[in-house]
Amino acid sequence: MSHITEQLNRWAPWLAIGGGLLWILYAIFEMLRPMGAVTVFTNDQGQALVTNPPALRVAGSIGGAALVLLGLTVVGTARRYHLPNNEPNRFGSTVPSRFGVAMGWVGALAGLLATASALLLLIPAHSAMQLFGAVLVPFGTLLVAIEANGSDHAYPIAAPLFLAGTLGMLALLAQAMLPLFAWMLPVYAALAMAVYGFVWVRVGGLLARQTPSP
């Protein structure tokens, strides 16, 4: 496991950039529907079907892949800045980054399952895994940011991670509100999601430029 996390440490900047770019693509395909509308319906046998399978496969696989990369970025960033570390614990018996790293792993797994279920057109499973990953990754990012903010050597990355985590939650809120304001929100929801992806690209650039203290 230590070998895997060390590789994630090395690749964290590129995972963040790749995940951010994929998330921007996902925002375009999921919100603006360039391949046409996707409607889910239930047939006489009670099976969930979709009217535009290629569009669902493309958007779902891109979104799932983005979650995989961003979840692994959370893990790699925590390892890069040695979180949790041996500094005095400011949070009692709770170590936020430990839970954040766990959420990063589970979010990446959810993204992998979201991609597979989208390709197989397993619509309920895809929706559940995409939502699960979209919640866990930004929440895990915020937990890592909380501990980084209190660390003597990881504080430079705390503010970018706070921003990424917060925008991830806002993007999720924009998606949730879409059915209520369908006449005006698709463009704004896509914009919020795209900004979230762009922030991850910037975080990746910052990780590539900064060398954390040993």
Image (cartoon, rainbow, N blue to C red):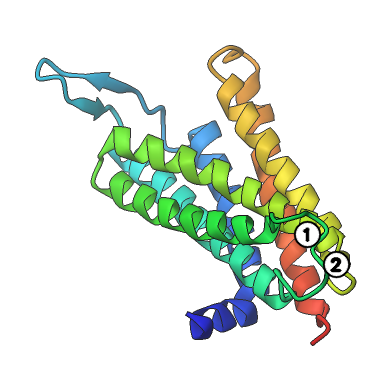
Amino acid carrying label 2: it is Ser
Position of residue 169 measured from the top left corner of the image (x, y, whole percent):
67, 37
- The disc at residue 151 is 2
Question: Dot 2 surroundings within 10 Å: few (below 14), some, or many (20 or more)?
Answer: many
Q: Quick check: can you spot residue 88? A: yes
Q: Could you say which is closer to the camera, residue 137 or residue 175?
A: 137
Residue 195, visible in the rendered structure: no
Q: Label 2's element?
A: loop
Q: Residues within 10 Å of mark 1 (few under 14, many from 20)?
A: many
Q: Position of residue 78 (x, y in %)?
A: 68, 69
Please give the residue where the numbered disc 1 appears in the rendered image.
Answer: 147
In depth, the one of 126 and 213 nearer the eye is 213
Q: Residue at x 59, y 61 (%)?
A: 101
Query: Which residue is at the far left?
Result: 45
Residue 201 in the image, given as x and y percentages of width and height: 71, 61
Q: Are marks 1 and 2 in contact (CB under 8 Å)?
A: yes
Residue located at (31% from left, 42% from top): 54
Q: Amino acid at mark 1?
A: Glu
The residue sitting at 87% across, 74% down in the picture is: 153
In the rendered image, the vertical position of residue 36 relative to residue 150, given as above or below: above
Residue at position x 83%, y 68% from top? 88
Q: Is residue 191 left or right of residue 113?
A: right
Q: Is residue 85 above or below residue 137?
A: below
- For the residues labelled 1 and 2, the Cα–Cα distance comes to 6 Å
Compared to residue 116, the image places residue 17 above or below, namely below
